[in-house]
Image (cartoon, grey):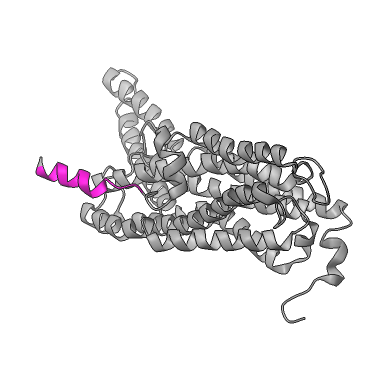
Amino acid sequence: MIAEVSLRKSIFYHPAANDPVYRFFAVPLGEKAIPAALLYFLFSFGGTILLSLAGGTLYRNGSLIPLSHDYLNLINLGLLSPLGAIVTVNFYRRLSRFLRCLVRGDWGSDTEGAAELHSMVKPMYQSSLASWLSFISGSVIAVISMLLRPGWWLGIHGGFTAFYARIFICLNYGVIILMLYKSLVTGFLLLRTMRLGLRIRPLHPDRCGGLKVIGDLSLSMHYFLTVVLLYLGLLALFEPECQQNPVFWFMFFLVLLVALSSPVYSLAGVHRMMQATRQRMLLRLSSSLQNSLEKVPGGDDLAAMQSVQGLTELYRLAESMPVWPYEFGSMARLISSIIMTPLAMLINMLSSGDSLVSHLDKLRFWGN
């Protein structure tokens, strides 16, 4: 009983404890993704629309470019922010579940090693320094962009509406930076988990060898990277000057490379273990099936025939055992969502006169 209470205390923490946005919008609603996203949508997009309507910046009024013409921020506040909220809530929920399974030893792993690994990543996830640096950096980015666009409704002359919207833009940038940091920690956590000797159950009903929790965490982390990639793609589509900036392309291809490769890299160890487990199971079943077949040369041993039938069905099940800890449909959706962004950018680049392809001679690098 004492050990059970100690276990509960050791895992009773939330990896989002240093995320004020999550604690304000998701925790009071029971950490449910859709309600949290709707609440964030009402505050960010709904509040901005109402204030811009009252302040006269929704439509053209004077010399400022109005909100109704700022398609990039309309999409960001109205669509990407709620989508990011959904992805973030799912990530934290799956991460919490993963940590609990890890410490409880649900995968039959080295419990001492699991507890040591848990103690190592706990302060990383709860780091106040990481949180402060993330939101300070987000604020700096938002203020700089505000100063660089004085003629827009969101610029320095946009009044209270601009400052209100900039609050949520600061929060968005802060959450993105904090989540990128936690994605790195999660990648480290997954790689170290592979060294604990996981027990794979080939015929587990989750059809992932009993490791679906691990696969779900990896996918949720990379869904977030997909949202970041989508934001960068929209930035390139609506801000053609970004396409002539080598720093932007470095960031874009870096995120694209990580989003495409990290689901495979972070779970490569699990993949090898699942492959080896399936192969061993197939060899054992094949040997047992061969022995049973030798007992029924004349077809008069009913027990042996039933054994052959049962072993044949098990062999077919083992052949269909997956070798990655997630469903094929989930992985296919992730890959397709990642590919769509660069594909849309490529089409725009080939058809736009303001694209990088049309201005290769004007491309400037540092120091040129």
- Compared to 110, does 245 lie above or below? below
Q: Identify the residue at horizontal 67%, vertical 54% (top origin).
A: 232
Q: In this view, does 354 lie to the left or right of 3?
A: right
Whether residue 52 can be seen here: yes
Q: Residue furthest right?
A: 353
Q: In which quarter of the image is the C terminus?
A: bottom right
Q: What stretch is highlighted in magenta?
A: 2-14
Q: Which residue lies furthest to the bottom in this view?
A: 367
Q: Main secondary structure of the magenta part?
A: helix
- Compared to 278, does 115 lie above or below? below
> How many callouts does the rendering have?
0
Whether residue 325 can be seen here: no
Q: In this view, does 227 lie to the left or right of 245?
A: left
Q: Does the magenta stretch include residue 84?
A: no
Q: Identify the residue at horizontal 24%, vertical 53% (top origin).
A: 110
Q: Which residue lies furthest to the left in this view?
A: 2
Tell me residue 165's x, y (percent). 63, 47
**Occupied quadrant, residue 170:** bottom right
Tell me residue 311's x, y (percent). 35, 29
Tell me residue 235's x, y (percent). 71, 53
Q: Is residue 12 magenta?
A: yes
Tell me residue 362's x, y (percent). 85, 71
Q: Quadrant of the N terminus?
A: top left
Q: Which of 180 and 58 is in front in this view?
A: 58
Q: Which of 16 and 120 is in front in this view?
A: 16
